[in-house]
Image (spheres, grey):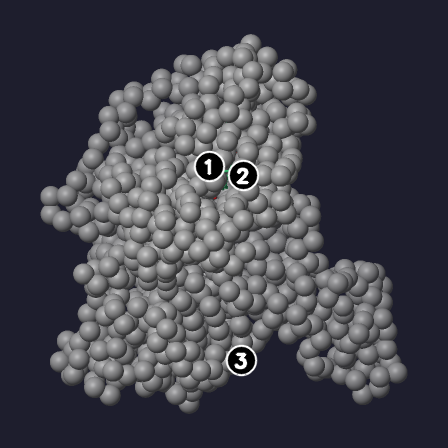
């Protein structure tokens, strides 16, 4: 682009918002083709049980019931796909409906198809399943003890896999250390809880031999390829549409049983089949995130130099794997050194089966776990060394001149200036004043705490080879005959706002108004084969594909303009809806006039075909590594254990920002979710494997009234990994916030001699920690 | 989830509503704001055959003030109570309890009568009802009767309400000349219900000594209760922050407390002491100042 960008970088409001706010958006459940039948499942109430018998006669005889399916009728459907693999991992086969055993509460056993949703649910309640309840494996650490009750009867133990990652020499690093700090920490299981639960509507037209599958997903093409495979249908006879999707957070980066089931049933019955998840089902059967318990050791010199970092961890898999279960904790390993120069690292992970739904990608997916343990250890070490936590962090940062920075975990951080982000945050927070305020409060018997997290994360997933395939993204840009532009993206936004930001990208390159650009995504019959939206890749990878496709179209338009103006195609400029010759600006035409020329095709430039439509598949050369500093001020009420966040200052460097409003929205939500994990969230199971808090009346999501105004600032260190210089922002807030909040609470409680409390820091836990120290 | 199917009637008079309840007996349930009943039905923990919606009965709504107190219709919503100047002036703790219930949507639909009849052990109002020594007027096939606060809550989800009876109103005497009240709670982060809620109502004599005090505690035990040990310890003397703290510490003592993943029994007993001290302290300062 020759001119300064007009739209890129502008805080333009999301064009999705008016329809979302007014209830005019169309989610899966809003589609009701005539003749739609409804599916409901009878599900296991037990963590583990033998199924002695299944009697569906009453359900089948109920009013309005059309069909009933059990394992027998559906065993031809391929098992739930597992995408990520590890050498030597045991891979249990996850059937579509349970056969002889159920292995987690919520596992579907029978599917009932009825004329109404009510009827289907009522009939599902009439299915008689004779269960023999068995001991369930709930606790991660107990599960791996020799002789533990087993999840899978035919495996020797609950060990799913062993995986390790090492860089440098940790033993030598520990020997070199003056101080070794150790702690055991838990990243509890949390539920992603997208506001729109999952849902699927499958409609097979026998005449056309063609199926349309509307599903609430982040990865429509993956669903098409994999679900078509599961039911034995050529994938090009299936059209997958991800309509409006009300959030995913990784939970919809997956292929679930109900998708294949609905696709199978509609092909059998030839009528549309709809299933929409209830919130209870969402708690039970949609993947969970996190779920790590580990022991951490960190060696340091007296001057604060970190010499070694080791993490021995148990990773909770659940009973079966979902698509990426086996990949998540490898991201923890890769990000173990964080933003510090740690030459010697080691992670030893043991995967553990439990009688619970699978864990998988949840906003941050492995990185929040790494950042949490590392940032907590930094504070523990600072106390041990008598250093200010800020100084300890600074001491170990690489300088900006050291980028690209190679880490001991084997990654190359693209660009960064960690000192600058920290400086900016300290200044915004007025750190000395904050400490003074803390001191003053302590003298009044009040407990204020300041928490830091200086984080780096891995985004823009990612080079295909590094991901084990499919790290690219596709885009097609079409300039219409009337001069409007349409973007067809292989990414699948579900709340991120790329309908706006991709329009900004195209508008700038073509010199047209962003309102003249429409962005289409989430329909496999319409957009080029795509990968989807996850891993903070939508803009970084998907947006980059848009840039290249846009530039191809622009180059082609320039040829038509050059022909018209009898000028050199390299001398053609696009600005404010006009196309003109740079060296002779009086030679000018409307953007739409040139577009129409390409479609009328009465005259064609040499070696040029009609039309203005170009596709690009963008393969990134590396991941991107956004970073930042979060500073949190809290007050803890020692009598009640209540935590109140008084201030939240965040400096995030996400590279170039296409739209700062969207960036802020992502950071707001991310901080809220990360704070939820720090203070409130935790999936709890009773002894039999039944969830104890699987409802919004029991499971606390962070609410607006528990959060302060966020003070957001940025530094901008572009990346050269992609043409936008953007690094990705979908997960930064979640990753940065959790340790900052916990560190602040622990700092507040330091007068009691408390150095660590496991999340979530619910009032009782905080109160108990104080009571123990007081006793 | 989705409730089992049911019939629905909406009578326009109290007599008609009572007749419907009589007609359907155990199979009928009163529907007020629906914010306790419908969740229970959706979870299929209750499946009444008939809902008798009392929202159409005008006489059950509204707040009226008299010389010595206020009368609040059973169908008055939490939001109306929260916003009422009469309630704020005559029984501040009741306005505070209403404001502390759930969220805006719940407060716009849920009613005083519904909350009392439901008698959730973690509901907010019961603490205030006990502290304020409120009188609950109920109507049944045999006419009206008045139930004293101390007799109303009989167990978890259990009250002195008889079969087929409808709560019509709640009467609360105004605070004494040198008296006031306060309600404070620790809310469960997910539901917003009280893990511990304490209402204190204090009347001071001319010398500033405590003439009367009542302390109601909710969320801690299976039923809301009065912390009589605290009341006794503070009655008759001029309070101080120290004496309040000492007396209040017994608010949870010996109580058979609820125990769940969110808050263990000992934590709840501890909170009862902390919140009793804070609520009494607040009521006292208001009483002394007003
Ligand atoms: C998300 C959520 C959060 C909540 N948080 C809180 C909270 O923090 N604190 C709190 O105290 N409550 C809370 N509640 C409960 C709320 O206050 C309810 O509104 C209240 O408990 C019931 O009032 P209702 O008018 O909705 O009654 P309904 O649900 O209509 O009825 C409840 C019961 O009372 C009976 N009933 C109703 N009216 C009468 C009457 N006049 N006479 C006789 N019987 C009657 C019904 O038959 C039924 O058994 C919450 C509810 C929800 C859904």
Outermost residue on the bottom side: it is A401
Q: CA distance from mark 3 to mark 1?
A: 63 Å
- Residue A159 location, x and y as percent? 20, 50
Residue at x 66%, y 60% (from the top left corner): A14
Residue with the mark numbered 2: B173
Say if B82 sits above or below A642 in the image: above
- Residue A233 location, x and y as percent? 49, 38
Say if A570 sits above or below A744 in the image: below
Left or right position of A687 against A633 = left
Labels 2 and 3 share a subunit: no
Q: Nearer the viewer, mark 3 or mark 1?
A: 1
**In-front residue for pair A762/B282:** B282
| Residue A404 shows in this picture | no
> Which chain does the residue under circle 3 lie in?
A
| Residue A658 shows in this picture | yes
Q: Nearer the viewer, mark 2 or mark 3?
A: 2
Q: CA distance from mark 2 to mark 3?
A: 64 Å
Residue at x 33%, y 79% (from the top left corner): A389
Quarter holding residue A504: bottom right
**In-front residue for pair A642/A275:** A642
Residue at x 54%, y 49% (from the top left corner): B177
Quarter holding residue A579: bottom right
Outermost residue on the left side: it is A147
Labels 3 and 1 share a subunit: no
- Residue A182 location, x and y as percent? 19, 70
**Quadrant including the C terminus of chain A:** bottom left
Q: Are marks 2 and 1 in contact (CB under 8 Å)?
A: yes
What label does residue B133 carry, if any?
1
What label does residue B242 carry, if any?
none
**Quadrant including the N terminus of chain A:** bottom right
Residue with the mark numbered 3: A716
């Amino acid at each position: 682009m020759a001119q300064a960008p007009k739209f890129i970088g502008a805080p333009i409001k999301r064009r999705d918002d008016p329809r979302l706010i007014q209830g005019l958006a169309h989610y899966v459940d809003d589609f009701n083709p005539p003749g739609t039948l409804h599916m409901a499942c009878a599900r296991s109430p037990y963590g583990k049980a033998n199924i002695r018998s299944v009697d569906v006669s009453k359900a089948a005889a109920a009013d309005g019931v059309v069909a009933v399916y059990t394992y027998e009728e559906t065993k031809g459907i391929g098992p739930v796909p597992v995408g990520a693999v590890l050498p030597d991992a045991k891979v249990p086969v996850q059937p579509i409906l349970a056969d002889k055993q159920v292995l987690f509460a919520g596992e579907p056993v029978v599917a009932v198809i009825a004329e109404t949703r009510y009827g289907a649910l009522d009939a599902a309640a009439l299915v008689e399943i004779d269960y023999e309840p068995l001991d369930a494996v709930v606790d991660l650490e107990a599960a791996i003890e020799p002789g533990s009750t087993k999840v899978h009867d035919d495996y020797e133990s609950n060990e799913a896999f062993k995986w390790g990652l090492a860089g440098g020499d940790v033993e030598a690093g520990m020997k070199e250390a003056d101080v070794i700090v150790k702690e055991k920490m838990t990243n509890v299981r949390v539920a992603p809880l997208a506001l729109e639960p999952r849902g699927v509507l499958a409609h097979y037209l026998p005449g056309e031999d063609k199926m349309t599958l509307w599903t609430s997903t982040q990865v429509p093409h993956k669903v098409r390829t994999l679900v078509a495979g599961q039911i034995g249908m050529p994938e090009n006879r299936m059209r997958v549409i991800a309509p409006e999707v009300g959030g995913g957070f990784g939970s919809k980066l997956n292929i679930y049983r109900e998708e294949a089931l609905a696709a199978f049933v509609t092909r059998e019955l030839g009528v549309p089949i709809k299933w929409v998840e209830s919130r209870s089902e969402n708690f039970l059967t949609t993947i969970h995130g996190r779920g790590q318990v580990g022991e951490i050791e960190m060696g340091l010199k007296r001057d604060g130099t970190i010499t070694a970092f080791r993490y021995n961890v148990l990773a909770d898999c659940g009973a079966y794997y979902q698509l990426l279960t086996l990949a998540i904790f490898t991201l923890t390993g890769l990000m173990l050194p964080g933003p510090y120069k740690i030459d010697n690292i080691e992670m030893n992970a043991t995967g553990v089966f439990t009688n619970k739904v699978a864990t998988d990608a949840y906003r941050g997916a492995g990185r929040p776990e790494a950042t949490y343990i590392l940032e907590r250890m930094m504070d523990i070490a600072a106390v041990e060394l008598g250093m200010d936590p800020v100084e300890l962090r600074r001491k170990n940062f690489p300088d900006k001149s050291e980028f690209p920075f190679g880490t001991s975990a084997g990654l190359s951080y693209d660009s960064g200036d960690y000192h600058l982000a920290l400086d900016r945050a300290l200044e915004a927070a007025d750190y000395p004043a904050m400490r003074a305020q803390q001191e003053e409060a302590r003298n009044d018997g009040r407990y204020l705490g300041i928490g830091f997290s200086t984080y780096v994360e891995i985004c823009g997933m990612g080079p295909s080879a590094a991901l084990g395939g499919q790290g690219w993204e596709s885009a097609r840009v079409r300039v219409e005959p009337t001069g409007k532009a349409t973007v067809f993206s292989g990414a699948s936004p579900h709340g991120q706002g790329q309908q706006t930001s991709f329009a900004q990208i195209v508008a700038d390159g073509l010199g047209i108004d962003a309102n003249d650009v429409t962005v289409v995504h989430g329909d496999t019959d319409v957009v080029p084969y795509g990968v989807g939206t996850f891993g903070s890749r939508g803009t970084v990878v998907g947006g980059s594909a848009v840039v290249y496709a846009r530039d191809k179209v622009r180059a082609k338009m320039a040829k038509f303009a050059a022909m018209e103006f009898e000028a050199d195609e390299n001398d053609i400029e696009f600005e404010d809806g006009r196309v003109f010759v740079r060296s002779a600006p009086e030679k000018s035409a409307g953007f739409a006039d040139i577009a129409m020329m390409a479609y009328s095709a009465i005259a064609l430039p040499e070696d040029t075909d009609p039309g203005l439509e170009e596709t690009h598949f963008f393969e990134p050369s590396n991941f991107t590594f956004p970073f930042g500093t979060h500073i949190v001020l809290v007050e803890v009420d020692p009598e009640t254990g209540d935590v109140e966040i008084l201030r939240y200052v965040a400096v995030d460097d996400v590279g170039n920002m296409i739209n700062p409003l969207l960036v802020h929205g992502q950071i707001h939500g991310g901080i809220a979710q990360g704070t939820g994990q720090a203070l409130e969230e935790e999936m709890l199971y009773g002894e039999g494997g039944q969830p104890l808090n699987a409802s919004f009346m029991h499971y606390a999501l962070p609410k607006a009234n528990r959060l302060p105004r966020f003070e957001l600032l940025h530094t901008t260190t572009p990346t050269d990994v992609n043409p936008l210089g953007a690094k990705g922002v979908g997960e930064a807030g979640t990753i940065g916030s959790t340790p900052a909040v916990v560190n602040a609470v622990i700092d507040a409680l330091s007068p009691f001699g408390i150095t660590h409390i496991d999340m979530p820091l619910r009032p009782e836990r905080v109160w108990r920690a104080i009571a123990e120290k007081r006793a | 989830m989705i409730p089992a199917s049911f019939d629905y009637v909406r009578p326009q008079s109290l007599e008609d509503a009572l007749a419907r309840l009589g007609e359907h007996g155990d199979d009928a349930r009163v529907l007020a704001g629906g914010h306790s009943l419908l969740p229970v039905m959706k979870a299929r923990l209750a499946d009444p055959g008939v809902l008798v919606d009392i929202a159409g009965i005008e006489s059950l709504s509204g707040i009226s003030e008299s010389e010595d107190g206020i009368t609040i219709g059973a169908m008055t919503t939490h939001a109306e109570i929260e916003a009422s100047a009469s309630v704020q002036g005559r029984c501040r703790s009741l306005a505070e309890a209403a404001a502390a219930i759930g969220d805006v949507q719940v407060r716009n639909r849920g009613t005083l009568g519904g909350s009392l009849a439901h008698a959730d052990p973690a509901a907010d109002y019961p603490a205030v009802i006990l502290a304020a020594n409120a009188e609950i007027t109920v109507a049944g096939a045999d006419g009206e009767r008045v139930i004293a606060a101390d007799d109303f809550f009989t167990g978890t989800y259990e009250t002195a309400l008889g079969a087929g009876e409808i709560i019509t109103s709640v009467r609360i005497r105004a605070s004494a000349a040198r008296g006031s009240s306060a309600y404070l709670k620790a809310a469960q982060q997910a539901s917003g219900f009280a893990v511990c809620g304490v209402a204190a109502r204090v009347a001071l004599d001319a010398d500033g000594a405590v003439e009367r005090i009542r302390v109601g505690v909710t969320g801690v035990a299976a039923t809301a209760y009065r912390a009589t040990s605290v009341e006794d310890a503070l009655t008759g003397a001029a309070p101080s922050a120290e004496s309040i703290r000492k007396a209040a510490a017994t608010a949870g003592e010996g109580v058979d407390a609820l125990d769940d993943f969110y808050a263990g029994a000992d934590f709840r007993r501890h909170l009862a002491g902390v919140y009793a001290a804070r609520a009494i302290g607040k009521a006292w300062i208001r009483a002394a100042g007003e």
